[in-house]
Image (tube, helix red, strand yellow):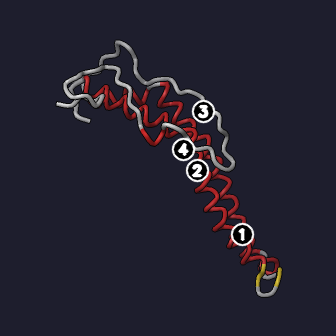
Amino acid sequence: MQSSNGRPGVQSRDAEYEDPWYDALAAGWGESAEQPAPVPAAREAGAAAAGPADVYLQVQRSEAFQEVRSRYRRFVVPGVIAFLVWYVAYVVTATTAPELMARQVTGAVNVAMLAGLGQFLTTFLLTWAYARHARLRRDRAALELRWDTQELSRSRGGAA
């Protein structure tokens, strides 16, 4: 039988998991090379849960899980609001001010066409920003929570 720490026959309660994808975060264009703020561990010493479902509730109530969720919300809520305002402004302008949208910018390109292409550009930029934010601010903490949850489930006799 292989234990959760990867060594056959060796059981460990506090196994360290190393993920090769997160050994060194690549700092590319527009990204800082500094490490993100640490997230507190989800493990609580002496907290006994009755079953596997209780393990997930314990992790969900942990400070580490709440921090990951708040980081997610701090990015997603403003992003969704900004994108929806931009989209509604585009649709409302197209229906209430067709003369403005029909104004030529250059050749066959008008304001409506530029605004429509801007919608696509905004979608791609928001997707890139979301992926970057997830990689730099949430992925490592979420992975640690996943490992903690699996380790707690195994120690309680559940199969996760």
Residue on which disc 3 sits: 36
Measure the C-alpha gap from mark 4 to mark 3: 10 Å
Placement of 105 over or under 76, stated as above or below: below
Mark 4 / mark 3, whichever is N-terminal: 3
Q: Which residue is mark 2?
A: 130
Residue at image position (72%, 78%) is 113
- Check contact, mark 4 vs mark 3: CB within 8 A: no
- The three-letter amino acid code for the residue at tag 4 is Arg
Mark 3 or mark 1, which has the lower sequence index? 3
Q: Nearer the viewer, mark 2 or mark 3?
A: 3
Circle 1 packing at 10 Å, graded few (<14), some (14-19), many (20+), is few
Residue matched to label 1: 92
- Residue 28 located left or right of residue 158: right
State which quarter of the image contains the N terminus. Answer: top left
Q: CA distance from mark 2 to mark 3?
A: 16 Å
Label 2 or label 1, whichever lies nearer to me, is 2
Q: Residue at x 50, y 30 (%)?
A: 66
Cα gap from disc 4 to disc 2, whole angstroms: 9 Å
Cα separation between marks 2 and 1: 27 Å
For disc 4, the neighbor class at 10 Å (few under 14, some 14 to 19, many from 20) is some
Query: In the current view of this chain or complex, which residue is farthest to the left?
Result: 1
Which residue carries the number 4 mark?
A: 135
Q: Residues within 10 Å of mark 3 (few under 14, many from 20)?
A: few
Secondary structure type for disc 1: helix
